Image (cartoon, rainbow, N blue to C red):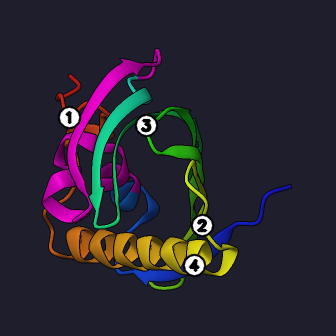
Amino acid sequence: MAEHTSSSITIEATPADVMGVIADFARYPEWTGEVKEAEVLATDAAGNAEKVRLLLDAGAIKDDHTLAYTWNGNTVSWTLVKSQMLRTLDGSYILADAPGGRTEVTYRLTVDVKIPMLGMIKRKAEKVIIDRALAGLKKRVESGSGGAEAGSADGTKKL
């Protein structure tokens, strides 16, 4: 089994509010830093994104890739469908209730690139990606910018 990197952060919001931001792919370029474009290609019957194309610019890694998403309560996970530079990009956000209406968010990530890279350097890159993503998510949620209305994965309003 491939090694993964993980980190956690506590956010001053409910799991539903946090998941609303995570599910709002159209707004990722506003808060993630590395994601320059995000396009939902397919949704499930509940309106959750099933397949998303992301244009990534993370300095040394620039890539246009597609991820498949699985939504299960307070957990969202993804796996790589196709990529130019990446062999593996598997990850998840796991949300848990914390005291005081807060949410503990754990982000797990496994990255493997098609070009040779030392494991130590790869783990450091994963850690930087995770830390930036968690900090951006926390700032976005706590600023009140929020996600898509009613938590819709494609940013459309559900009636």
Label 2 with label 4: CB-CB less than 8 Å:
yes
Q: Which stretch appears magenta?
A: 19-46
Q: Residue 106 appears in which quarter of the rendering? A: bottom right
Instruction: Residue under label 4, please give it.
Output: 121
Tell me the distance, in whole angstroms, between the alpha carbons under discs 3 and 2: 16 Å
Mark 3 touches mark 2? (CB < 8 Å) = no
Mark 4 secondary-structure assignment: helix
Q: What element carries label 3?
A: loop
Work out whether mark 4 precedes mark 1 in sequence or the reverse, and give the earlier one: 4
Looking at the image, which residue is at 17% across and 53% down? 29
Report the front residue among 77 and 20. 77
User: Disc 1 marks which residue?
Assistant: 155
Viewer-side label of 1, 3: 3
State the image quarter where residue 117 is shown.
bottom right
Badge 3 is on which residue? 84
Kind of residue at badge 4 = Ile
Q: Which amino acid does label 3 sit on?
A: Gln
